[in-house]
Image: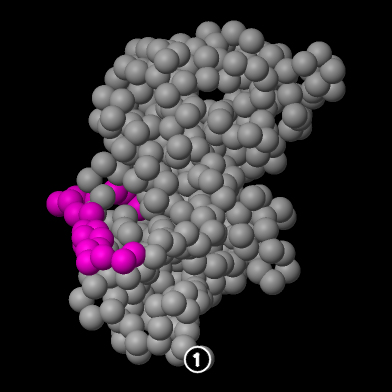
């Protein structure tokens, strides 16, 4: 889990207007069928067991989910060389996939992490790399893409007719280089995808191959991938958007379509860490309270429920870890408020997100607007004198989904103000006069 590469949250931008006019209504998205709701399981680690697999899938089943995303690190499943799969890792993988399939859930496999024997990491990291535990060297792509292609082909053949999609690597555009280190990232990632796609399709043509796994919504890395020849080697693009998730989806999709790419998006990671007040920021995103996490889960699944170009919306994640509190369950398997919120919204996703709440206060000739709104997109404020729009502003909510804006004193104390989220439009907004 890592934050979206959207620009840092917009500070208030405002333009005073002196003539009639205003923004048109921003309509909500709609479609006959929506994305498959899912969640990220804990995934395969060096100590994972079949019992862990049983527990994880049982929890996902109790949430009524339709999809699970499971990380199977190459470095854990094939630590010592080509053609040799680790029996302990394989026991977990077999169980979790079989259990999820038996429960009627779509299975998305994320395959990443180069084993020591295949990594292109610098020599110093390679020398320190050990097959029995994780190492920074695992975060570099393989020297030979064909080694990765052979591995995912073996996985696709083993789990033929059991998995829905295979996601190639994790966040190659992430600036911290934890997952995909080294130079020429776009070209090297494209080489990996071009090698893996035909290998997977040869083993099972029905498996959807997902490329991207991108955190950046501005299209810079995506366009570099297009230039590197990635088109035609995937069935969908995976995206991981944590900051302004809805705005990120909209921006990314517009760039994708403008580039002649109409493949569906798979929102394979999004979420909120309930680390507040113990922390303010965790892994580049703002910490929230458990109550806000639950509220955001509900509103986000409702907002995404009818997006026509979205194949899945897969929450990050099932359970907290020692370093990340984005789970709907704690490390000790306690259920947070977000667990119940997720279970409820999956069964009834078509309700509208929470409406904007707006309060106006006039003091010494100046109006202050405050209130709250649903997470995920930029907010708009418009101030009218009579029927004439005099002022508008674009802003973002704080970590608690609240806002407070002082309007310019020149506007005076008698105004009609409306506030709405771009994604839901005026129907979800609020209007008040003072």
> In the figure, 150 relative to 25: above or below?
above
**Percent x, y for residue 131?**
75, 24
Q: Residue 210 falls in which quadrant of the image?
A: top left
> In the figure, 283 relative to 151: above or below?
below
**Percent x, y for residue 19?**
26, 65
**Percent x, y for residue 401?**
49, 70
> In the figure, 202 relative to 343: above or below?
above
Determine which residue is flagged by label 1: 363
Magenta span includes 171: no
- Please state which of residues 182 and 203 is positioned toward the viewer in this rendering: 182
Magenta span includes 38: yes
Residue at 66% x, 65% y is: 275
Name the side, left or right, on which 316 lies relative to 230. right
What range is drawn magenta here? 17-39
What's the magenta bit mostly, secondary-structure-wise?
Answer: loop
Q: Secondary structure at mark 1?
A: strand
């Amino acid at each position: 889990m890592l934050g979206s590469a959207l620009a840092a949250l917009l500070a208030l931008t405002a333009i005073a207007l002196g003539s009639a006019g205003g923004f048109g209504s921003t309509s909500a998205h709609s479609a006959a069928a929506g994305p498959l709701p899912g969640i990220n399981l804990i995934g395969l680690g060096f100590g994972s067991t079949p019992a862990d697999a049983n527990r994880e899938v049982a929890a996902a089943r109790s949430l009524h989910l339709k999809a699970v995303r499971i990380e199977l690190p190459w470095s854990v499943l094939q630590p010592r060389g080509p053609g040799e799969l680790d029996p302990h890792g394989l026991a977990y993988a077999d169980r979790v996939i079989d259990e999820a399939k038996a429960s009627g859930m779509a299975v998305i496999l994320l395959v990443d992490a180069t084993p020591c024997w295949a990594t292109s990491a610098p020599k110093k990291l390679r020398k320190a790399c050990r097959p029995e535990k994780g190492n920074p060297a695992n975060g570099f792509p393989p020297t030979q893409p064909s080694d990765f292609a052979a591995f995912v082909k073996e996985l696709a053949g083993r789990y033929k007719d059991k998995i829905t999609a295979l996601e190639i690597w994790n966040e190659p555009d992430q600036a911290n280089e934890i997952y995909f280190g080294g130079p020429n990232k776009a070209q090297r990632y494209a080489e990996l995808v071009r090698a893996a796609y035909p290998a997977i399709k040869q083993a099972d043509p029905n498996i959807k191959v997902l490329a991207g796994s991108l955190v950046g919504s501005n299209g810079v890395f995506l366009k570099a991938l297009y230039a590197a020849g990635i088109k035609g080697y995937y069935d969908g693009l995976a995206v991981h958007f944590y900051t302004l998730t809805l705005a990120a989806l909209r921006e990314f999709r517009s760039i994708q379509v403008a580039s002649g790419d109409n493949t569906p998006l798979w929102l394979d990671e999004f979420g909120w860490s309930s680390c507040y007040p113990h922390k303010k920021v965790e892994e580049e995103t703002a910490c929230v309270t458990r109550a806000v996490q639950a509220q955001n889960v509900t509103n986000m699944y409702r907002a995404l429920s009818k997006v026509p170009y979205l194949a899945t919306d897969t929450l990050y994640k099932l359970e907290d870890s020692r370093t990340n509190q984005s789970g709907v369950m704690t490390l000790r398997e306690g259920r947070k408020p977000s667990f119940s919120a997720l279970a409820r919204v999956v069964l009834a996703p078509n309700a509208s997100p929470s409406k904007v709440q707006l309060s106006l206060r006039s003091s010494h000739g100046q109006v202050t607007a405050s209130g709250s709104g649903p997470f995920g997109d930029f907010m708009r404020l418009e101030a009218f004198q009579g029927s004439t729009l005099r002022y508008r502003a674009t802003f973002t909510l704080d970590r608690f989904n609240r806002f407070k804006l002082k309007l310019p004193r020149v506007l005076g104390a008698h105004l009609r103000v409306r506030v709405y989220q771009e994604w839901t439009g005026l129907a979800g907004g609020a209007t008040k006069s003072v």
